[in-house]
Image: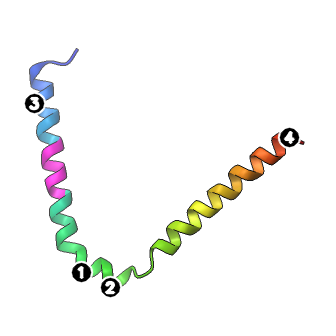
Amino acid sequence: MFTTGRIIFTISFALIFIIGLVFSYKKDKNNTQFHYKKNYLILLGIIGILTLLYLIVKIRHYF
């Protein structure tokens, strides 16, 4: 199913991709901190909305 060539390609691709992500993150770190202050509030809002939808579905199940 998985040949040696496919395994080598997959590992190589994953390593290069992760290295690229780390390099890009380090390069853009200062810019991100300047433009996206308090982004945790957006995350909390999304989690709150998903929790609310989950509770609505569970409550409707009982009625």
Q: In the rendered view, how is the structure colored? A: rainbow
Instruction: State yes or no: discs 4 and 1 in contact (Cβ < 8 Å).
Output: no
* Residue 43 lies in the magenta-colored region: no
- Circle 2 SS class: helix
Asked which quadrant contains residue 5, the reply is top left
- Residue type (three-letter) at the residue carrying disc 2: Phe
Query: In the rendering, at what x and y percent does residue 28 appear?
Result: 22, 74
Q: Which of marks 3 and 4 is in front?
A: 4
Report the residue marked by disc 3: 8
- Which region is colored magenta? 14-20
Report the residue marked by disc 4: 62
Instruction: State yes or no: discs 2 and 3 in contact (Cβ < 8 Å).
Output: no
Cα–Cα span, label 4 and label 1: 49 Å
Q: Residue furthest bottom?
A: 34
Instruction: State yes or no: discs 3 and 4 in contact (Cβ < 8 Å).
Output: no
Query: In the rendering, at what x and y percent does residue 24 appear?
Result: 19, 65
Cα–Cα span, label 3 and label 4: 52 Å
Cα–Cα span, label 2 and label 3: 39 Å
